[in-house]
Amino acid sequence: MLPGSINSGTTDAPVARRVDALMPADVILLGEQHDAADHHRIERETVEALVAQGKLAALAIEMAEEGGSTAKLPATATEAQVQDALKWNDKAWGWDDYGPAIMVAVRAGVPVVGANLPLARIKDAMADVSLDAQLSNSGRETQQAAVRAGHCDLLPESQIGPMTRVQIARDRSMAQAIVKVRQPGKTVLLISGAGHATKTIGVAQHLPTDLSIKAIQLQAGGDGSGDGGGSGRAKGYDAIWQTPALPEKDYCASLRKG
Protein backbone atom coordinates (compact mmCIF):
# COMPACT_ATOMS: atom_id res chain seq x y z
CA MET A 1 0.00 0.00 0.00
CA LEU A 2 1.27 3.51 -0.79
CA PRO A 3 2.43 5.74 2.08
CA GLY A 4 -0.54 7.48 3.65
CA SER A 5 -3.04 5.67 1.45
CA ILE A 6 -6.15 3.87 2.62
CA ASN A 7 -7.67 0.60 1.53
CA SER A 8 -10.32 0.74 -1.18
CA GLY A 9 -13.71 1.20 0.45
CA THR A 10 -12.24 2.41 3.76
CA THR A 11 -13.27 5.98 4.47
CA ASP A 12 -12.84 6.25 8.24
CA ALA A 13 -9.04 6.19 8.65
CA PRO A 14 -8.24 9.23 10.83
CA VAL A 15 -6.89 12.08 8.75
CA ALA A 16 -4.35 12.90 11.46
CA ARG A 17 -2.88 9.42 11.12
CA ARG A 18 -2.70 9.73 7.35
CA VAL A 19 -0.97 13.10 7.65
CA ASP A 20 1.51 11.67 10.13
CA ALA A 21 2.36 8.91 7.63
CA LEU A 22 3.38 11.56 5.08
CA MET A 23 5.99 13.13 7.34
CA PRO A 24 8.56 14.52 6.99
CA ALA A 25 7.46 16.74 4.13
CA ASP A 26 8.39 20.27 3.14
CA VAL A 27 5.27 20.50 0.97
CA ILE A 28 1.98 18.62 0.88
CA LEU A 29 -0.08 19.06 -2.28
CA LEU A 30 -3.69 18.19 -1.46
CA GLY A 31 -5.72 17.84 -4.66
CA GLU A 32 -9.50 17.97 -4.36
CA GLN A 33 -12.61 17.59 -6.46
CA HIS A 34 -14.06 21.05 -5.98
CA ASP A 35 -17.68 20.02 -5.37
CA ALA A 36 -16.99 17.18 -2.91
CA ALA A 37 -18.00 18.20 0.60
CA ASP A 38 -15.96 15.36 2.12
CA HIS A 39 -12.85 16.82 0.54
CA HIS A 40 -13.39 20.15 2.26
CA ARG A 41 -13.77 18.32 5.58
CA ILE A 42 -10.52 16.44 4.98
CA GLU A 43 -8.78 19.71 4.12
CA ARG A 44 -9.86 21.21 7.43
CA GLU A 45 -8.75 18.12 9.33
CA THR A 46 -5.40 18.15 7.52
CA VAL A 47 -4.83 21.75 8.60
CA GLU A 48 -5.85 20.80 12.15
CA ALA A 49 -3.42 17.86 12.17
CA LEU A 50 -0.48 19.96 10.99
CA VAL A 51 -1.33 22.73 13.47
CA ALA A 52 -1.52 20.18 16.31
CA GLN A 53 1.98 18.98 15.41
CA GLY A 54 3.27 22.55 15.21
CA LYS A 55 4.35 21.77 11.66
CA LEU A 56 2.24 24.07 9.48
CA ALA A 57 4.42 26.80 7.94
CA ALA A 58 1.61 28.22 5.81
CA LEU A 59 -1.58 27.32 4.01
CA ALA A 60 -1.46 28.15 0.30
CA ILE A 61 -4.68 27.99 -1.69
CA GLU A 62 -5.67 27.93 -5.34
CA MET A 63 -8.91 29.66 -4.35
CA ALA A 64 -7.30 33.09 -3.88
CA GLU A 65 -4.98 35.01 -6.17
CA GLU A 66 -1.27 35.50 -5.60
CA GLY A 67 -0.70 38.54 -3.39
CA GLY A 68 -3.59 37.89 -1.02
CA SER A 69 -2.38 37.02 2.49
CA THR A 70 -3.55 36.90 6.08
CA ALA A 71 0.01 37.31 7.39
CA LYS A 72 -0.66 40.76 8.85
CA LEU A 73 -3.92 39.76 10.53
CA PRO A 74 -4.15 38.75 14.20
CA ALA A 75 -5.32 35.27 15.16
CA THR A 76 -8.54 36.91 16.36
CA ALA A 77 -9.40 38.32 12.90
CA THR A 78 -12.99 38.01 11.78
CA GLU A 79 -13.99 35.94 8.79
CA ALA A 80 -14.84 39.16 6.96
CA GLN A 81 -11.34 40.50 7.61
CA VAL A 82 -9.82 37.26 6.35
CA GLN A 83 -11.92 37.33 3.18
CA ASP A 84 -10.88 40.93 2.57
CA ALA A 85 -7.19 40.11 3.05
CA LEU A 86 -7.45 37.25 0.56
CA LYS A 87 -9.61 39.28 -1.85
CA TRP A 88 -12.05 36.38 -1.69
CA ASN A 89 -14.45 35.82 -4.60
CA ASP A 90 -17.39 33.98 -3.07
CA LYS A 91 -19.11 33.53 -6.43
CA ALA A 92 -16.14 31.55 -7.72
CA TRP A 93 -15.31 29.71 -4.50
CA GLY A 94 -17.91 29.25 -1.78
CA TRP A 95 -16.59 30.50 1.54
CA ASP A 96 -18.65 27.87 3.36
CA ASP A 97 -16.52 25.22 1.62
CA TYR A 98 -13.07 26.66 2.29
CA GLY A 99 -13.57 29.02 5.21
CA PRO A 100 -13.37 26.33 7.92
CA ALA A 101 -9.88 25.15 6.85
CA ILE A 102 -8.68 28.72 6.37
CA MET A 103 -9.91 29.87 9.76
CA VAL A 104 -8.18 26.97 11.55
CA ALA A 105 -4.88 28.28 10.17
CA VAL A 106 -5.70 31.90 11.01
CA ARG A 107 -6.68 31.02 14.58
CA ALA A 108 -3.35 29.20 14.96
CA GLY A 109 -1.43 32.26 13.79
CA VAL A 110 -0.42 30.54 10.55
CA PRO A 111 -0.47 32.65 7.37
CA VAL A 112 -2.88 31.79 4.57
CA VAL A 113 -1.71 32.93 1.15
CA GLY A 114 -3.37 33.16 -2.23
CA ALA A 115 -1.42 31.15 -4.79
CA ASN A 116 -3.37 31.29 -8.04
CA LEU A 117 -2.36 33.30 -11.10
CA PRO A 118 -4.18 36.65 -11.01
CA LEU A 119 -6.90 37.02 -13.62
CA ALA A 120 -5.16 40.16 -14.88
CA ARG A 121 -2.22 38.02 -16.03
CA ILE A 122 -4.20 35.32 -17.85
CA LYS A 123 -4.06 37.04 -21.26
CA ASP A 124 -0.29 37.47 -21.02
CA ALA A 125 0.12 33.81 -20.04
CA MET A 126 -1.86 32.68 -23.07
CA ALA A 127 0.62 34.42 -25.36
CA ASP A 128 3.81 33.50 -23.45
CA VAL A 129 5.42 30.82 -25.62
CA SER A 130 8.25 30.41 -23.08
CA LEU A 131 5.75 28.52 -20.92
CA ASP A 132 5.74 25.73 -23.50
CA ALA A 133 9.25 24.77 -22.36
CA GLN A 134 8.26 24.43 -18.71
CA LEU A 135 7.14 20.83 -19.26
CA SER A 136 8.63 17.98 -21.25
CA ASN A 137 7.01 17.18 -24.59
CA SER A 138 5.10 14.28 -23.06
CA GLY A 139 4.11 16.36 -20.05
CA ARG A 140 2.84 19.14 -22.28
CA GLU A 141 0.82 16.65 -24.32
CA THR A 142 -0.67 15.26 -21.12
CA GLN A 143 -1.58 18.76 -19.98
CA GLN A 144 -3.12 19.51 -23.38
CA ALA A 145 -5.24 16.38 -23.12
CA ALA A 146 -6.37 17.49 -19.66
CA VAL A 147 -7.31 20.91 -21.04
CA ARG A 148 -9.37 19.29 -23.79
CA ALA A 149 -11.16 17.03 -21.34
CA GLY A 150 -11.63 19.83 -18.83
CA HIS A 151 -13.41 21.88 -21.47
CA CYS A 152 -15.53 18.92 -22.57
CA ASP A 153 -13.76 18.69 -25.96
CA LEU A 154 -15.52 21.91 -26.96
CA LEU A 155 -12.49 24.20 -27.27
CA PRO A 156 -11.31 24.92 -30.81
CA GLU A 157 -7.90 23.38 -31.42
CA SER A 158 -6.37 26.86 -31.79
CA GLN A 159 -7.14 27.49 -28.11
CA ILE A 160 -5.56 24.33 -26.71
CA GLY A 161 -2.02 25.73 -26.73
CA PRO A 162 -2.91 29.07 -25.10
CA MET A 163 -5.13 27.42 -22.45
CA THR A 164 -2.39 24.91 -21.68
CA ARG A 165 -0.02 27.80 -21.05
CA VAL A 166 -2.53 29.22 -18.58
CA GLN A 167 -2.54 25.94 -16.65
CA ILE A 168 1.25 25.87 -16.61
CA ALA A 169 1.34 29.50 -15.47
CA ARG A 170 -1.10 28.71 -12.67
CA ASP A 171 1.03 25.80 -11.51
CA ARG A 172 4.14 27.97 -11.58
CA SER A 173 2.36 30.71 -9.64
CA MET A 174 1.33 28.23 -6.94
CA ALA A 175 4.88 26.90 -6.75
CA GLN A 176 6.28 30.41 -6.34
CA ALA A 177 3.79 31.12 -3.56
CA ILE A 178 4.92 27.95 -1.76
CA VAL A 179 8.60 28.85 -2.03
CA LYS A 180 7.97 32.30 -0.54
CA VAL A 181 6.46 30.87 2.66
CA ARG A 182 8.57 27.74 3.18
CA GLN A 183 10.21 27.25 6.58
CA PRO A 184 12.89 24.68 7.48
CA GLY A 185 11.44 21.82 9.52
CA LYS A 186 7.84 22.78 8.72
CA THR A 187 5.30 21.96 5.99
CA VAL A 188 3.53 24.19 3.50
CA LEU A 189 0.11 22.80 2.64
CA LEU A 190 -1.38 23.62 -0.77
CA ILE A 191 -5.10 23.08 -1.35
CA SER A 192 -5.91 22.92 -5.04
CA GLY A 193 -7.73 20.95 -7.68
CA ALA A 194 -6.33 17.48 -8.20
CA GLY A 195 -4.87 18.35 -11.61
CA HIS A 196 -2.55 20.90 -10.02
CA ALA A 197 -1.44 18.42 -7.34
CA THR A 198 -0.12 15.66 -9.59
CA LYS A 199 3.67 15.48 -9.65
CA THR A 200 3.81 14.56 -13.34
CA ILE A 201 2.58 17.88 -14.77
CA GLY A 202 1.46 20.05 -11.85
CA VAL A 203 2.87 22.38 -9.21
CA ALA A 204 5.69 20.01 -8.24
CA GLN A 205 7.26 20.48 -11.68
CA HIS A 206 8.04 24.07 -10.73
CA LEU A 207 9.31 23.53 -7.17
CA PRO A 208 12.99 23.29 -6.17
CA THR A 209 14.29 19.73 -6.40
CA ASP A 210 15.64 19.80 -2.85
CA LEU A 211 12.15 19.95 -1.35
CA SER A 212 10.41 16.86 0.01
CA ILE A 213 7.01 16.89 -1.70
CA LYS A 214 4.03 14.64 -0.99
CA ALA A 215 1.12 14.71 -3.41
CA ILE A 216 -2.33 13.46 -2.40
CA GLN A 217 -5.39 13.00 -4.57
CA LEU A 218 -8.75 13.22 -2.85
CA GLN A 219 -10.92 10.90 -4.94
CA ALA A 220 -14.71 10.72 -4.72
CA GLY A 221 -15.70 7.15 -5.50
CA GLY A 222 -13.63 4.88 -7.72
CA ASP A 223 -11.39 2.11 -6.50
CA GLY A 224 -8.72 4.20 -4.83
CA SER A 225 -6.34 3.87 -7.75
CA GLY A 226 -6.82 7.24 -9.42
CA ASP A 227 -8.86 8.31 -12.44
CA GLY A 228 -8.71 5.77 -15.20
CA GLY A 229 -7.10 3.06 -13.11
CA GLY A 230 -3.43 2.49 -12.45
CA SER A 231 -1.54 3.12 -9.25
CA GLY A 232 -1.59 6.45 -7.48
CA ARG A 233 2.19 6.57 -7.73
CA ALA A 234 2.05 6.03 -11.51
CA LYS A 235 -0.34 8.96 -11.81
CA GLY A 236 1.97 11.25 -9.91
CA TYR A 237 0.42 10.98 -6.44
CA ASP A 238 1.99 9.51 -3.33
CA ALA A 239 -1.42 8.46 -2.04
CA ILE A 240 -5.10 8.37 -2.95
CA TRP A 241 -7.48 9.31 -0.16
CA GLN A 242 -10.82 7.92 -1.24
CA THR A 243 -14.19 9.32 -0.18
CA PRO A 244 -17.73 8.13 -0.96
CA ALA A 245 -18.93 8.55 -4.52
CA LEU A 246 -21.01 11.58 -5.45
CA PRO A 247 -24.26 11.39 -7.41
CA GLU A 248 -23.59 11.20 -11.14
CA LYS A 249 -23.52 14.61 -12.77
CA ASP A 250 -22.95 15.71 -16.37
CA TYR A 251 -20.50 18.56 -15.86
CA CYS A 252 -20.46 19.31 -19.59
CA ALA A 253 -24.20 19.75 -20.04
CA SER A 254 -24.24 23.50 -19.41
CA LEU A 255 -21.22 24.04 -21.68
CA ARG A 256 -22.87 22.12 -24.50
CA LYS A 257 -26.00 24.24 -24.16
CA GLY A 258 -23.86 27.37 -24.27
Image: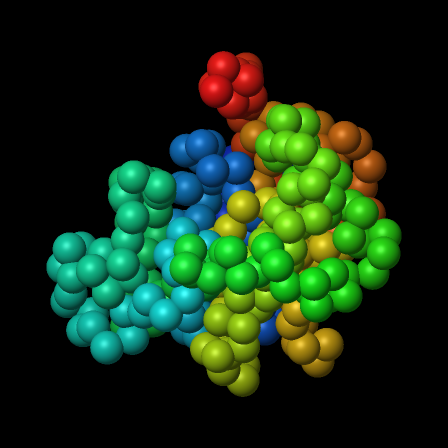
Residue at the extreme right of the image, as rendered = 138
Residue at 79 percent across and 32 percent down: it is: 229
Q: Is residue 80 or residue 233 the one in the foreground?
A: 80
Residue at 35 percent across and 52 percent down: it is: 101
State the image coordinates of residue 13 (x, y, percent, origin top left): 55, 41
Q: Is residue 230 or residue 206 the one in the foreground?
A: 206
* Position above or below: 183 against 24: below
Residue at 41 percent across and 42 percent down: it is: 40
State the image coordinates of residue 195 (x, y, percent, origin top left): 63, 46
Q: Residue 209 sits in which quadrant?
A: bottom right
Would residue 9 appear left or right of 180 to someone viewing this image? right
State the image coordinates of residue 151 (x, y, percent, origin top left): 60, 32
Would residue 208 appear left or right of 76 to someone viewing this image? right
Q: Is residue 255 or residue 213 the one in the foreground?
A: 255
Quadrant occupied by the N terminus: top right
Residue 166, visible in the rendered structure: yes
